[in-house]
Image (cartoon, rainbow, N blue to C red):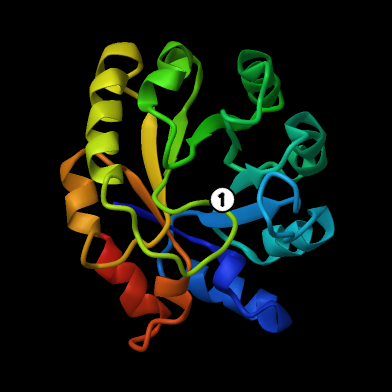
Amino acid sequence: MLVAPSILSADFGNLDFDVKAICEGGCDFVHVDVMDGHFVPNLTIGPVVVEAVAKAATKPLDIHLMVENNTFFVDLFAPLKPEFISFHIEEEKHPHRLIQKIRGLGIRPALVLNPHTPPEAIEYLLGDIDMVLLMSVNPGFGGQSFIPTVIEKAKKLKSLIEIRNPKCLIEVDGGVNDKNVKELKAVGVDIVVAGSYVYKNSNGILSAIESLKC
């Protein structure tokens, strides 16, 4: 299992230290949640802060857009050359066009599904993307509880991926911990995002990340 700790749960007063801590702790990606206060009821960070994260990180960035104007935000963050930029299918009127734009910028495109959105909604886009991010909480805030039905959803998505694009990765974000990560692994999930579990773990960041690498 690959691990992408979310900096949403980091101490923004010591962001440089906290980003370096997860990279040194063995993470595979640095997950960056970008929220605009419109698509979700929260406002997080812009390109100035993410640029600082990119400078501190020794692992690739995984940027998750939770915004209304996806194209505008893609243009903002593309110069930082993240590994992935993911956007919500629920908000994008022309997803195929945006997928092509992201790939044309040398970035791996990914789609995000909210808890209520079925995998079939993106079946005919799977051949054009490199990853699907399944939200296992309602997006907008960290520290929420895992929604168990994402297990069944991931299993269904995996079956579609095997037909349409076997190289496409599955990522899960929200309420992930050492208790549910093995279930996620068993149904074909490749990457887990964890914020609170990693940064607020009483055993420390290194131990938290190791416990997710099942």
Q: Is residue 160 left or right of residue 80?
A: left
Depth order, front residue of 144/102: 144
Q: Residues within 10 Å of mark 1 (few under 14, many from 20)?
A: some
Q: Residue at x 49, y 54 (%)?
A: 29
Snapshot quadrant of residue 14: bottom right
Question: Whole-percent x and y of residue 204?
Answer: 39, 84
- Which quarter of the image is occupied by the C terminus? bottom left
The residue carrying mark 1 is 60
Name the residue at 31% across, 43% down: 190
In-image side of 144 versus 177 (left or right): right
The structure residue drawn at horizontal position 37% and vertical position 34%, both measured from the top left corner, is 169
Left of 106 or right of it: where is 164?
left
Helix, strand or loop under label 1:
loop
Q: Quadrant of residue 141?
A: bottom right
Q: Position of residue 109 (x, y in %)?
A: 57, 29
Q: Quadrant of residue 73?
A: top right
Left or right? Give the position of 156 relative to 142: left
> Up-down: is 113 above or below 123?
below
Q: Position of residue 202 (x, y in %)?
A: 36, 88
* Residue 147 sits above or below residue 15 on the image: above
Measuring from the top left, give residue 93's x and y in whole percent. 68, 19
The kind of residue on which mark 1 rests is Pro
Give the residue drawn at x 49%, y 52%. Answer: 138
**The one of 99 and 118 positioned closer to us in this rendering:** 118
